Image: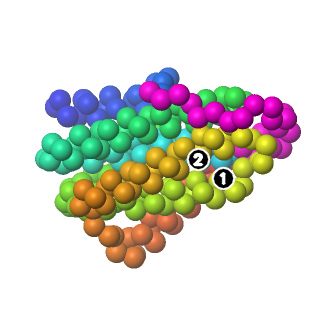
Amino acid sequence: MEKILQTADAALRTLFADHRSARPTPHSAPGVSELTAEERKLSAGFMRVNHVGEVCAQALYTAQAAMTRNAALRGQLEAAAREETDHLAWTRQRLDALGSRPSLLNPLWYAGAFALGLVAGRISDRVSLGFVAETEDQVSEHLGKHLKQLPANDLASRAVVAQMKFDEEEHANEARRAGGIELPGPVKALMRGAARVMTTTAHHI
C-alpha cells in the first residue's frame, strides 16, 4: 500500500505540481533580438515535446524504481528522476516565457510510459537498465535534432536543450555501467515508432 501511495504521489506531482529545479536554469548570452511570432510558435512546439519527454522520464523512473528489489539501483533511478525534475522545471519555464502551454495529453503520456517501465522492471534489472539506456539515447538524438531546428536567435531554449542533452547522455552511460543490456533491434524500432507518434502529436496538442 505504501508503494502504491508513493507512486500515485509521484504521478500527481509530475503532472500537476509547480516544479522547482535544484540547479540554476541554463543561461545564454544576453543581447539576443526578440523572436518573431512564428519563431516563438516553433520554439514552443519543440519545448512542449521536450516537456512531454520529461513527463515520460518521470513515469519510467518511478515505475522502474518501484519494481526493483535492488536498493542501489532504486537509489540510482530515484537520483536520475530528481535530475529530470530540473528538466521539467526548465522546459515549463521556457513554455511560459514563450506564451505557450504543456501538452494537453500529459496524463496519457505518463500512463503509457509508466506501463512500459513496469514491464521492463518486471523482466529484470538488466533489462530495465537497458531500457533506460536506449530511451536516453533516443531522447538525446531528438534533442540534437531540436538544436539544429530551433530558431538561431532563441539562445535561451538552446541553452536548456544543450544541458538536457548532456544530462541524458550521462544517464544512458550510467545505465550501461550499471549492467544494462543492449535491447533487441525490433524493441528499439518499436520504441522509435512510439516516440515518433508522441513527438508529432505533442508538438501541436
Q: Nearer the viewer, residue 83 or 113?
A: 83
Q: Residue 93 colored magenta?
A: no
Q: Disc 2, disc 1: CB below 8 Å? A: yes
- Bin the neighbour count of mark 1 within 10 Å (Cα to Cα): few under 14, some 14-19, many 20 and up: some
- Residue at figure coordinates x 22%, y 43% from the top left: 74
In the image, residue 113 lies at what x, y percent?
Answer: 40, 50
Q: Residue 36 colored magenta?
A: yes
Identified by mark 2, the residue type is Ala
User: Could you say which quadrant of the image residue 99 lies in?
Assistant: top right
- Residue at figure coordinates x 61%, y 29% from the top left: 93
Disc 1: which residue: 147
- Residue at figure coordinates x 23%, y 34% from the top left: 4
Residue 120 visible (yes or no): no
Disc 2: which residue: 162
Identified by mark 1, the residue type is Leu
In the image, residue 72 lies at what x, y percent?
Answer: 18, 44
Judged from the image, the secondary structure of the residue bearing numbered disc 2 is helix
**What residue range appears in magenta?**
22-43
Could you tell whether 127 is left or right of 69 in the image?
right
What kind of secondary structure does the magenta stretch mostly adopt? loop
